[in-house]
Image (cartoon, helix red, strand yellow):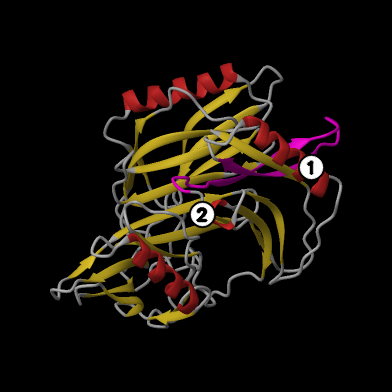
Amino acid sequence: MRWLAIDYLDHVQGECEKSFPWETKIPGFTAEVRASEFAGGDTDAPVRHKRVEYRMPDTTPRDHLLKLRDQVEKALKGNTIRRSPGEQKLLFEFGSSSDTAFKAWIRVRAPLQVVPGTGPHAGTEDPGAPRKLELHIPTITDDPYRSVGVMTQSELPAGDHLVGLLHRPDGRMEEIQSATTIYAGSRRLRVMRHLIWPMTLFESNRVRGILEEMRAAVDGQVVQLKPDERARVFQATNDHGYRTEGFVALRSQTLSVTGLPPAYVSIADTPQNYWPHFLSVKLKVSAQPGSLLYAVGLSGDGMALETSTSIMRRSTRAWAGDSCYWYYPRDFQAEDIGEIIRQLESTKATSPNGIQILPGQRVPVFAVTNQAGAIFRGYFERPMTAGKK
């Protein structure tokens, strides 16, 4: 795969967040965006740089991509982009027509509004209070499997988790696919929950229309749910008159620090090759719903590098299970990453039934030192949870 990378420095004033939304209508192409950071410049006074990378279509000739790269450099290099919450700027547009375009923006938004006291370490002041969820619709792309979805980054108390419900035309109510991705960086922990509804009773064009309707009615909306309540996110009727409905529902359970069962994570597979700047590792995770488990990467000076753990309660074409990503320092070479893979393989062999992780525990998985003496360590961690209803 080929990627267009943009390095930048940021300066944040006040409470806000940046994002990099994109839109593509290129047939058969699924866009990906990834973010990372690294220390650059003077070795005695390094500066923390940020990077955003966009996957480019494999079918596009290289000379076209180089031309796009030069256009992006001419438009952006050395310039300052200043935006306030709610504002965005187009970074680039690629494609010969509106039907084959690939667009990317930088957007600034106010932080998500979260119910007070509902973070991962929340107490039990009012367990029956409604949770506020800000829902978003992922960017529409061609989906040969015909599905629709919603996502949220709103925080939930420990022990709470979301499920998607599908009300079929014959009256059955089923739970649908879900995935939870935990991003851990040097500043904060971010949890993204994604619910996916299959739409096999509808033609592809109708599915796109339903997504557009959801975008107009649901995207950016805040719903309030109490435990065991649900909110409808779409309702659609196909050409044969069969109606299908999709709901988001909140599940809640009692979690106690002293009585919480342990979680287990095992290395299912390690990469034979690795992508520049990150390792992708396949896992098997066994944890109580609503209990977070995430990967941690630390450099020798204690700097937390970006990592992510995807707990995917579903099967995909490539993998039926969980996964995690460790973004390693850029001054680590191939032999250093090979040593990390060797240690992961050793853990896989010595702990086939999984590594036990208790609440509040951080379990080391690997540690490697490069030729310059810098150390990079990887862990699995489970945050402490307060007992709640």
**Spatial separation of the CA atoms under disc 1 and disc 2:** 24 Å
Upstream in sequence: badge 1 or badge 2: 2
- Asked if the stretch drawn in magenta spans residue 198, the answer is no
Q: Are marks 1 and 2 in contact (CB under 8 Å)?
A: no
Q: Can you give x and y, in whole percent of width and height, for residue 195 in the image? A: 37, 62
At mark 1, the secondary structure is helix
Q: Is residue 325 above or below residue 204?
A: above
Label 2 element class:
loop
The amino acid at mark 2 is Lys
Outermost residue toward the left in this view: 170
Q: Examine the rendering and report whether any part of residue 74 can be seen.
A: yes
**What residue would you read off at disc 2?**
25
| Residue linked to disc 1 | 73
- First to last magenta residue range: 27-56
Left or right, 198 with reference to 47: left
Q: Residues within 10 Å of mark 1 (few under 14, many from 20)?
A: few
Dot 2 surroundings within 10 Å: few (below 14), some, or many (20 or more)? some
Q: Is residue 29 magenta?
A: yes
Query: Which of the pair 345/169 is nearer the observer?
Result: 169
Which quadrant would residue 36 be assigned to in this image? top right
Identify which residue is drawn at 48% across, 59% down.
192
Q: Main secondary structure of the magenta part?
A: strand
Query: How many callouts does the rendering have?
Result: 2
